[in-house]
Image (cartoon, helix red, strand yellow):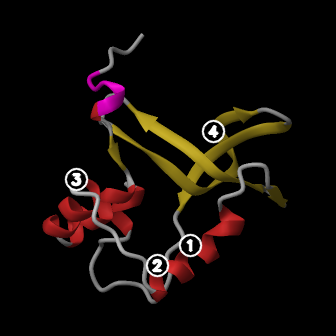
C-alpha cells in the first residue's frame, strides 16, 4: 500500500494549476482568500460544462468510450479535482474496463471556453 503524503485537508484543487501558472496572485485570491466574482465569461463556461459534468452520461464512439465528470485524487501529489472527460481508447496494452471487452488506454480531456492560449496555462492542468 502506498503511504499518503498529504492529508485530506491539505489537498489542492487541480483547477488551481491553471490559475497558478497564469498568475500566482490570481491563484491566491481564488484558492486561498476565496475571492471570486462571476462575470459573463465564467457564467458561459459554467453553462457549457453542464452536459460535461454529468457523471451518469456515458458515450461509446466506436473504439472510444467517454466517461464524464471523473473524480481524481492523488494523496502523493496532494491534488484533487474532476476531469471533464476521460476517453478510454481501445489498445493492446491498456487496462480492463468494466462492461467492455478488450484493453483500454485512458486520456484526459479538459474543455475550455474561448480560443487556445498562446502559452501552456490550459495544458498544465492535464499533466
Where is mark 3, residue-wise?
32
Where is mark 4, residue-wise?
94
Which residue does the image show at 32% across and 19% down from the upper left? 4
**Quarter holding residue 12:** top left
Left or right placement of residue 73 versus residue 78 in this view: right
Which portion, as a residue range, is magenta? 5-9
Where is mark 2, residue-wise?
42
Residue density around tag 1, few if under 14, some if 14–19, many if 20 or more, within 10 Å: some
Percent of width and height locating residue 24:
15, 65
Percent of width and height locating residue 112:
49, 75
User: What SS does tag 2 mark?
Assistant: helix
Q: Is residue 15 above or below residue 106?
A: below
**Quarter holding residue 48:** bottom right
Q: How far is mark 1 from mark 3, CA to CA?
A: 21 Å
Where is mark 1, residue-wise?
46
Q: Is residue 110 above or below residue 86?
A: below
Residue density around tag 2, few if under 14, some if 14–19, many if 20 or more, within 10 Å: few
Percent of width and height locating residue 27:
23, 63
Q: How far is mark 3 from mark 2, CA to CA?
A: 19 Å
Quarter holding the N terminus is top left
Q: How far is mark 4 from mark 3, CA to CA?
A: 38 Å
Whether pointer 3 and pointer 2 mark residues with C-beta atoms closer than 8 Å, the reply is: no
* Marks 4 and 2, the one that precedes in the sequence: 2
Quarter holding the C terminus is bottom left
Left or right placement of residue 127 versus residue 31 in this view: right
Q: Please name which of the two marks, 4 or 1, marks the residue nearer to the observer.
A: 1
Amino acid at each position: 500500500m502506498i503511504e499518503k503524503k498529504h492529508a485530506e485537508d491539505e489537498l489542492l484543487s487541480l483547477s488551481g494549476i491553471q490559475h497558478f501558472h497564469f498568475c500566482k496572485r490570481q491563484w491566491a485570491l481564488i484558492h486561498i482568500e476565496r475571492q471570486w466574482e462571476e462575470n459573463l465569461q465564467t457564467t458561459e463556461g459554467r453553462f457549457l460544462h453542464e452536459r460535461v459534468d454529468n457523471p451518469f452520461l456515458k458515450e461509446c464512439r466506436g473504439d472510444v468510450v467517454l466517461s464524464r465528470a471523473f473524480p481524481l485524487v492523488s494523496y502523493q501529489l496532494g491534488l484533487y479535482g474532476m476531469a471533464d472527460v476521460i476517453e478510454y481508447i481501445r489498445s493492446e496494452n491498456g487496462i480492463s474496463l468494466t462492461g467492455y471487452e478488450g484493453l483500454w488506454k485512458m486520456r484526459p480531456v479538459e474543455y475550455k471556453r474561448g480560443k487556445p492560449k498562446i502559452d501552456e496555462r490550459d495544458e498544465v492542468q492535464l499533466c
